[in-house]
Amino acid sequence: MDNGEAGRERAPQSSIADEHRLLIEHIDAASNAIDLFFAAPANQAGADARRIIALLEDLRDVAQAHFRHEEALMTKTAFPGFTCHKRDHDYLLKNLIHFTSALSHDTVPFAPDIGVNLRSWLTYHIRKYDDAYMAFIETGTFEAGDEDCEAVS
């Protein structure tokens, strides 16, 4: 294998890793704003909630762009775990959009563990789904157990 071929194989992995870092930055920004929200005096809470909504909308946009990119790569490489992987993307986006909308309309209780939940989802998703995809890209093999989808509503 020449250096050109090795570079082409590594490109998806490095670009996905860069996108994961960007997602983490956005999750951290929203999480930090949530922490400040709960530490702020009550008269400041409205402004902080609007900032959090904006940060969550930014996170949604970054996540949607990343998911589209990742799903296009999985389609291009005929990744056998595509359906489960996409289902997890859809689950996060659905919940993020629903929560942001409910927060915007003041119809959902706002809890301090939201940022922790976002981080937990991302960590779980990367370990379960993205690592399996990267292993497939690098080796061309896919573990049979990797294709099992958990029931996600």
Image: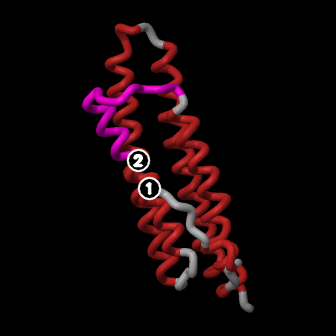
Nearest to N terminus: mark 2 or mark 1: 2
Q: Quadrant of the C terminus?
A: bottom left
Question: Does the magenta segment cover residue 109?
Answer: yes
The mark found on residue 95 in the picture is: 2
Q: Seen from this angle, which residue lies furthest bottom? A: 1
Position of residue 108 in the picture relative to residue 7 (left or right): left
Tag 1 residue: 153
Above-or-below relation of 100 to 35: below
Q: Nearer the viewer's eye, disc 2 or disc 1?
A: 1
Secondary structure at badge 2 equals: helix
Q: Is residue 87 left or right of residue 120?
A: left
Q: What number is the disc on residue 51?
A: none
For the point 47% across and 64% down, the residue is 87
Q: Position of residue 81 (x, y in %)?
A: 57, 75
Which residues lie in the magenta part? 96-112
Task: Indicate the amino acid at tag 1.
Answer: Ser
Please determine whether, in this image, residue 121 is positioned above or below residue 87: above
Q: Count neighbours of disc 1 (C-alpha within 10 A) and say few if under 14, some if 14 to 19, many if 20 or more.
A: few
Do tag 2 and tag 1 residues touch (Cβ < 8 Å)? no
Report x, y in % for residue 8: 61, 81
Q: Is residue 37 left or right of residue 127?
A: left
